Image (cartoon, helix red, strand yellow):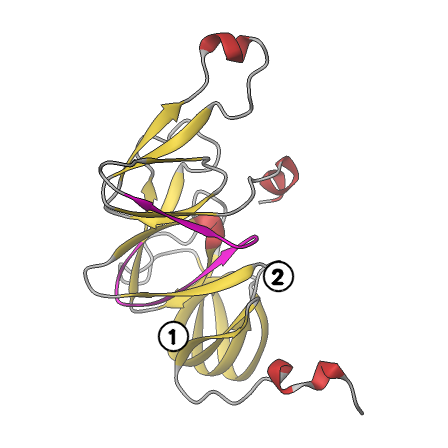
Amino acid sequence: MKSDLFSTENLAQQATTPGMTLQNSKSVKYAVNGEMHARQGSMIAFRGNLQFERKGQGIGGMLKRAVTGEGLPLMAVRGQGEAWFAHEAQNCFIVEIDQGDALTVNGRNVLCFDATLSYEIKTVKGAGMTGGGLFNSLFTGYGKLAVICEGTPIVIPVSPQAPVFADTDAVVGWSAQLHTSLHRSQSVGSMLRGGSGEAVQLKLEGDGFVIVRPSELTPQKASAN
């Protein structure tokens, strides 16, 4: 049988190293030898001796809560084998977190991560009245985290001299040391006339970066999450 479908770039190879690698731009392969954590329902294939368990409670402080404010159930994957993860054909990126690093990620953008990472649900300061950024996920420790994004993300540097204002529905994540607050860029008069559609943003100040996606959350997807 012959087809471009069977080209080498599409063929799943045996893992040569443990842990997380990109299978392609839309999926992540994880060679499991022990335990890892993933977004529930994101496993698209596996081989080997693996068990998948939905987590409702924390695992010794690593998972203080298994459901984020964005409605993201998590599962533990245990055993030995290989598993592939993806979500709605979104682009996948692997972030290596070292000791001393701290990254805040929107719950809807988490795909899977090493069990060596500590994970905590945090309320975003200053964003309690916004629709898309009330709860985010804080990752610390060391290990790899797979992040998903609709479209190609934009990484914007933040400095004390140049704060960044981001739509809460477009934010993927940011340096955890940044200070966040709510910013209103629309006047009361404009709101009374129907508004601009850009009334409130998340203001990020300090030294670091913010990651945004090239789209806002549509009402249909918001209701589906």
Q: Main secondary structure of the magenta part?
A: strand
Quadrant position of the C terminus in the picture = top right
Q: Amino acid at mark 2?
A: Ala
Residue at 63 percent of width and 81 percent of height: 10
Which numbered disc, 2 or 1, marks the residue closer to the eye? 2
Q: Quadrant of residue 27?
A: bottom right
Q: Is residue 54 visible?
A: no
Mark 2, residue position:
89
Amino acid identity at mark 1: Glu
Q: Which residue is mark 1?
A: 35
Residue count near mark 2 (Cα–Cα under 10 Å), binned few <14, some 14–19, many ≥20 = few
Q: Quadrant of the N terminus?
A: bottom right
Q: Is 82 included in the stretch rendered in magenta?
A: no
Residue at 32% x, 62% y is 59
Q: Position of residue 170 (x, y in %)?
A: 49, 41
Q: How many marks?
A: 2
What is the spatial separation of the Cα atoms under label 2 and label 1, in whole angstroms?
Answer: 25 Å
* Spot occupied by residue 216 in the image (x, y as percentages of width and height): 55, 39
Side (left or right) of 182 relative to 199: left
The residue segment tinted magenta is: 139-158
Residue in view at x 44 percent, y 49 percent:
107
The x and y percentages for residue 85 are 54, 69
Residue 151 belongs to the span the image colors magenta: yes
